[in-house]
Image (cartoon, grey):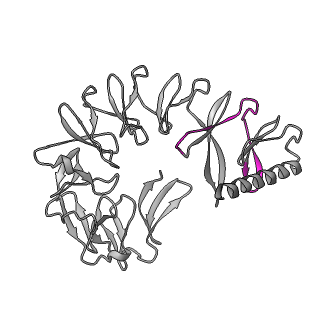
Amino acid sequence: MKNKVFKIFVIMLLAANVSYAGSNPKIDKATFQEIDASYSKDKNGVYVWENRGWKKLEGIDPVTFEIINISGSARRYLKDKNGIYSIIYSMDGDSDKLVLENLPYDPQTYEVINQLYSKDKNNIYYNDKKIEGVDKNTFELTYDFGSVVNGYYSKDKNNVYYENKKLKGIDVKTFKKISRLVDNFLIEDKNGFYIVEEDGSIAPIDSKEVDIENLSQLAIKTNLYHDKDSMYFVKNHKLVKIKDAPKVDPYNLSTYNDKYINKYDIVYYLDTNEGAFKKLEKAESHQFRAYGDTEYAKGKKSVYFKGKVLAGADYASFDMKYNHEKDVYEIKDKNKVYETVKAD
């Protein structure tokens, strides 16, 4: 029943779009062709449906135009004889502006490998980012649980790669990802075990000190780790045991970011210089929030920086806000900007 309703909705939408095309003097009615609910073309160009109307995508060749749908992924690309493109939205004043972004692929040889990887005659890519220095002839994906759905690792005859980053010092022949249901941080080779950091650096693990079998991230993609008895963080590419850390309890311990955690409604701050958690005596955990991966946070009554109340901060106006002009997030109050964070 739901499928029938959805099909009827799509048909109605396409009918409305065709009706609009007939009333649009810029579209050639004789050659107008509906491709799907979002795209159409005529002899003069290709159009995208936006704000209840067809907007022409300048520079796209309608004869060779096609849509690339990547199976299992939300990514969708446009292609013609001249290039491969994606549609993005940038800020133009107070409103979004549709922009056609030219991707760095060779349109004649572009090929999708899977949801994450693709290639052309020149390069291999991870999520549109070129894998520098990769040997194309020996490149292969590594498999998790029989698939590469979550395959963040690949290799060639010379190197192992995490996403698009080369992992220095890892032995290719004996490289292995340690299987976890959701974690992707732990690998090994003939020389030992390693934590893979977000920037592609590796931190060796002393398997005599750390319970490798039970080592996990406290939260996905954070710099906080734990085994059965201890908590750790990575500093200067070394795994550091946290002093007097609260015992990990999956039901009563949560993270705000790499610096702030909550256990039994008590907020702690990780002082990486001392390698220890410090309790925030005044923190109101029920309304507590941390700002991105920064040292700034806010409770019910106070603003915090590095685990201490930030003197002089205006509580009411303190927040993280997006600066459209600079494409950054600003942690600020009405009086000053404290820190800027790059937008993803």
In which image quadrant can residue 297 be found?
bottom left
In percent of width and height, residue 180 lies at 30, 46
Residue 73's x, y, as percent? 53, 44
**x, y percent for residue 285:** 32, 75
Magenta stretch: residue 53 in it? yes
- Quadrant, the N terminus: bottom right
Q: Nearer the viewer, residue 244 or 58?
A: 244
Residue lying at the far bottom of the rendered structure: 301
| Residue drawn at 56 percent across, 55 percent down | 325
Where is residue 201 shown, x and y percent of the image?
Answer: 29, 40
Say which residue appears at 22% left-offset and 49% top-offset.
235
Whether residue 131 sits left or right of residue 60 in the image: it is: left
Rendered position, 154 above or below 267: above
* Vertical arrangement, residue 181 with respect to residue 80, above or below: below
Residue displayed at 81% across by 38% down: 42
Q: Which residues are magenta?
A: 49-73
Q: Does 52 appear above or below 149?
A: below
Left or right of residue 42: residue 49: left
Q: Is residue 54 magenta?
A: yes
Residue that extends furthest to the left in the rendered view of this protein = 208
